[in-house]
Amino acid sequence: MPMVTLRIQRFDPENDQRPVYREYAVNADPTDRVLDAINSVKWYQDGSLTYRRSCAHGICGSDAMRINGANRLACKVLIRDVGAKVTIEPLMGFRVIKDLVVDMEPFFAQFRSVLPYLINDEGAPERERTQSVHEREVYDDTTKCILCAACTTSCPSFWADENFVGPAAIVNAHRFIFDSRDKAAAERLDILNDREGVWRCRTVFNCTEACPREIRITKAIGEVKKAILSSAR
Amino acid sequence: MTVAAQVDGRGEPRRGGGYDRPKGRLANFEVFSWFFMRISGLVLILLALYHLIWWNLVIGVEHLDSQVVIERWSNPFWRLFNVLLVTFALLHGLNGARYSIEDYIRRRGLQIAVKTIVYSVVLVTLVIGVYALLTFDPASFFAIR
């Protein structure tokens, strides 16, 4: 097995004043994932290395981190795609709790602020609320979000302004705004029609590039902007 | 743990997290300024392309003398064209500068100061430009010289 060097940003809040980088040499196949290499460090070299990972199959969104400067899921990136020397850092823009674990609460607060759940106060129908294939296609892309925060923490507008609602929250608002069964689109558009809402977006496309689910985020944000424009007339 | 930091420019906390829009803000200002950027950007491309291609390539920069300027000036459509060009260019640029100022200057007092300076410079330039385009009389100007 070839050797791979992991350069990992470490921070122990009880002992460190500021983050430090430590290097670890591990055996890894080109077809191993970066997560396998990090696991190898934790299991066989330094048990104090702290990071989040749950399903390890690209669905739970726990192990988003900066890998060679780009936001990626450690469980979806192969060693052969990042080379023999890999720099691993926590997501940018959040408080680091320890090593690669960041405080995600501000992210979830922004997510909650766009009412990311079905709102329909009409009485329950006789049968299920049906939806045509076309009606479903309108928001199909934005149903894929796993809330890993790779998009929001790659966004320069978010780096400059922690109050910016962020691409992930807009994606999840989009998922309900364009759902034919939902009745609170106007309320969500009003929330996002704000300097800290969609208008802080400068269409940089970092979010679209970072998304491990390949959601066309900038396009979704553009659709929300257009919806606000047509409801404002 | 819920984050409840009260920040300048935010309204009351909203149920489920986040904040309301602060009271008293111009309704829909941001959406219309965004729309204005799209429209003015498109108009500017057409105006600037015409200006560049017609006057500098077709007529040719070597043929631009006072006689050509006087002829151009006597045409009201050419003046209107330039009023549009200067207005859209300055306002499009001003709004872009506003975006950048709001993105990068976080201190409220400093932000107001910088905005005041930038808005004033652009406004004065716009007034002088439009005034000159509408009142300047090239025939008498060149006759005096």
Image (cartoon, rainbow, N blue to C red):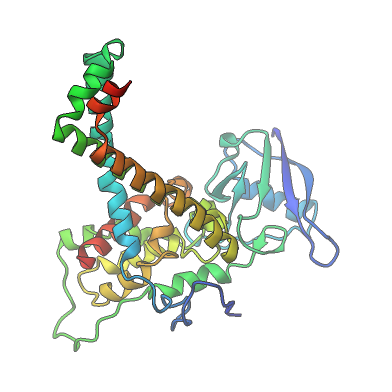
* Nearer the observer, A182 or A5: A182
State the residue in front, B88 or B5: B88
Closer-to-camera residue (A11/B7): B7
Q: Position of residue B108 (x, y in %)?
A: 57, 65
Q: Is residue A48 left or right of residue A111?
A: right
Please identify the residue farthest to the right as the structure is shown. A15
Task: Point out residue B6 in the picture as x, y percentages from the top left corner.
Answer: 57, 78
Q: What residue is drawn where x is 20% and y is 29%?
A: B73
- Give me the residue at 30% from left, 69% from top: A176
On-image quarter of the C terminus of chain B? top left
Give left or right: position of A141 versus B112: left
Do we see residue A215 in this rendering?
no
Q: Position of residue B119 (x, y in %)?
A: 44, 53
Residue at horizontal 73 percent and vertical 48 percent from the top: A8
Q: In this picture, is B20 found above or below A123? A: above
Q: Nearer the viewer, residue A118 or B125?
A: B125
Q: Quadrant of residue A86?
A: top right
The answer to whether residue A204 is above or below residue B45 is below
